[in-house]
Amino acid sequence: FPGLVLKMEMSGVEIIDESHDNVTVRVAAGVSWDAFVADAVQRNWWGIENMSLIPGTVGAAPVQNVSAYGQECRRVITRVEAYDTLQDRYCALSNVQCDFGFRKSIFNTHAKGRYIIAHVHFRLSKKRKPCLSRKNVVRALRQQRIKKIGSMTRYTKHAVCKPRLHFRWVYTQAEIREVIVALRSNGILLPKPDDACGSAGTFFRAIVVPHHDIGGIIMKTGKNLGFLAAIKIMACRWTLSSSQGVKLPSRMLIDACGLTHLARGDIALFPGNCAVVISKTASARAADILDIVSNVRKTVFEKTGVAVPVEPSLIGFSDSELAESFNLGATTG
């Protein structure tokens, strides 16, 4: 990479305000995100436990409004302290000024590259506030509790098989974190942490489509990919709709287009989650990454009308290389 790379190493977590119900902490940008989550769980501070095991630093969290399993950074971030390279001064940006949205903020959109984040302020709850909106998390929690109970006491087969008829369980923060870590490291949706393959996590992220566009997308998808693919998008309209639009998972779109096993050289889509790109060996070529990007985006766009976004920042490529790879044809998205 023909440039200068600076790695943020500032550390420290400071309590700046505390009440009976809440605590506000000022966290340095170089702090490991998961270490901060683990510390919050240890202190019984609620609001970020579902975002366990996300790699990276605290300073990176506001950039794309990090989120997982129903929790979002924008719900707990109150302020971002940063160095403004344009005005050559330090500044503090409020939550509103950060303009948070789904996987976005000013830091990766219209002000990309302008700010160097130094500290982030989080307002966390000292009162129990679990976020259990994801069925797979609740299912895993139940299974984990059943396993623990089964190892400690004797229960009939009927009681173990149908726990909800006998128990109304309250899960601890530690249990929730344990389950999230297990889900993120079981090798199903993401490569296991000790896998030899390289990965940047989710590569093709979900997209929020305006409500007025979803009808055309459903019709185009049905015409090119069939009734079942169109039904899945209609289901998103019912279950993943918000005031901003309809969230369409990239994995669903890529799979519908028959690209699940797409590979170029030593670069491939991850078998368990085609929204993830992996490198099989250390000799993988960067050109193959661009080929994957081009193939996925163009195919999905031609079949559904959706321009699948790329989540990581791609550096070291020329402007012409990126333009060619991201070009969708006569109409861009």
Image (tube, helix red, strand yellow):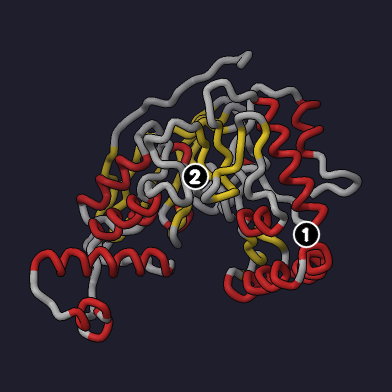
Furthest toward the bottom, the residue is 165
Q: Earlier in the sequence, mark 2 or mark 1?
A: 2
Q: Position of residue 22 (x, y in %)?
A: 28, 59
Query: As drawn, is 152 to the left or to the right of 58?
Result: left
Q: Quadrant of residue 234?
A: bottom right
Query: As drawn, is 58 to the left or to the right of 62?
Result: left
Q: Position of residue 111 (x, y in %)?
A: 64, 38
Which residue is found at the position 81% from the left and 33% from the top?
A: 324
Query: As drawn, is 38 to the left or to the right of 216?
Result: left
Q: From the viewer's perspective, is residue 126 above or below residue 55?
A: below
Disc 2 residue type? Pro
Asked whether residue 109 appears in the rendered view, the answer is yes
Asked whether residue 107 appears in the rendered view, the answer is no
Q: From the viewer's perspective, is residue 73 above or below residue 235?
A: above
**Figure quadrant of the N terminus:** top right
| Residue count near mark 1 (Cα–Cα under 10 Å), binned few <14, some 14–19, many ≥20 | many
Disc 1 residue type? Thr
Furthest toward the left, the residue is 153
Which label is found at residue 304?
1
Q: Quadrant of residue 56?
A: top left
Q: Nearer the viewer, residue 93 or 182?
A: 182
Which residue is found at the position 52% from the left and 37% from the top?
A: 200
- Measure the alpha-carbon separation of dots 2 and 1: 31 Å
Which residue is found at the position 48% from the left and 51% from the top?
A: 189
Q: Which residue is mark 2?
A: 62
Query: As drawn, is 132 to the left or to the right of 150?
Result: right
Q: Position of residue 149 (x, y in %)?
A: 15, 69
Which residue is found at the position 43% from the left and 26% from the top?
A: 8
